[in-house]
Amino acid sequence: MYLSVQLSYYPLGNDVKPLVKDVVKRLEATGLEVYPNRMSTQIFGEFDTVMAALNDVMKWSFETYGKAVFTANFLEGDRRPRD
């Protein structure tokens, strides 16, 4: 099953921009299709692969940077942007 996710990451603290960039970079390293923009990051792939990547990245974020808020919207199916 294909999954489309819109993910927002809000680290709690000062100077959050480098932290957000690190989380996006880590998501991109998973091999999934990742489209960052100013408000959120869109992630696309097979359900189990996406969920495993989110689990790993979120855990890594909490362990590395501490408290943060993640918000996500999940939609079954392929909602990748089309050119």
Image (cartoon, rainbow, N blue to C red):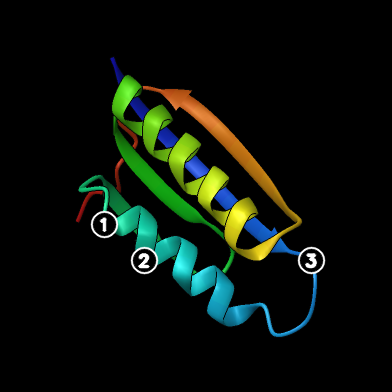
- The numbered dot on residue 12 is 3
| Cα distance between the residues tagged 2 and 3 | 19 Å
Residue 83: give x, y in percent of width and height.
19, 56
Residue 29: give x, y in percent of width and height.
26, 57
Q: Residues within 10 Å of mark 2 (few under 14, many from 20)?
A: few
Closer to the chain start, of discs 3 and 1, is 3
Say which amino acid is labelled 3.
Answer: Leu
Q: Which residue is drawn at 23% across and 49% down?
A: 82
Left-right relation of 29 to 21 = left
- The numbered dot on residue 25 is 2
Answer with the quarter of the image where residue 19 lies.
Answer: bottom right
- The numbered dot on residue 29 is 1
Q: Which residue is drawn at 58% across and 61% down?
A: 64
The answer to whether mark 1 and mark 2 are in CB contact below 8 A is yes
Q: Which residue is drawn at 36% across and 66% down?
A: 25
| Cα distance between the residues tagged 1 and 2 | 6 Å
Left-right relation of 17 to 83 = right
Q: Is mark 2 on a helix, strand or loop?
A: helix
The front one of 31 and 57 is 57
Q: In this view, does 4 lie above or below 34?
A: above
Q: How crowded is mark 3: few (under 14 residues within 10 Å), some or many (20 or more)?
A: few
Residue 3: give x, y in percent of width and height.
36, 26
Q: Quadrant of the N terminus?
A: top left
- The numbered dot on residue 5 is none
Q: Is residue 16 above or below residue 63?
A: below
Q: What element carries label 1?
A: loop
Say which amino acid is labelled 1.
Answer: Ala
Q: Residues within 10 Å of mark 1 (few under 14, many from 20)?
A: few
The answer to whether mark 2 and mark 3 are in CB contact below 8 A is no
Say which amino acid is labelled 2.
Answer: Lys
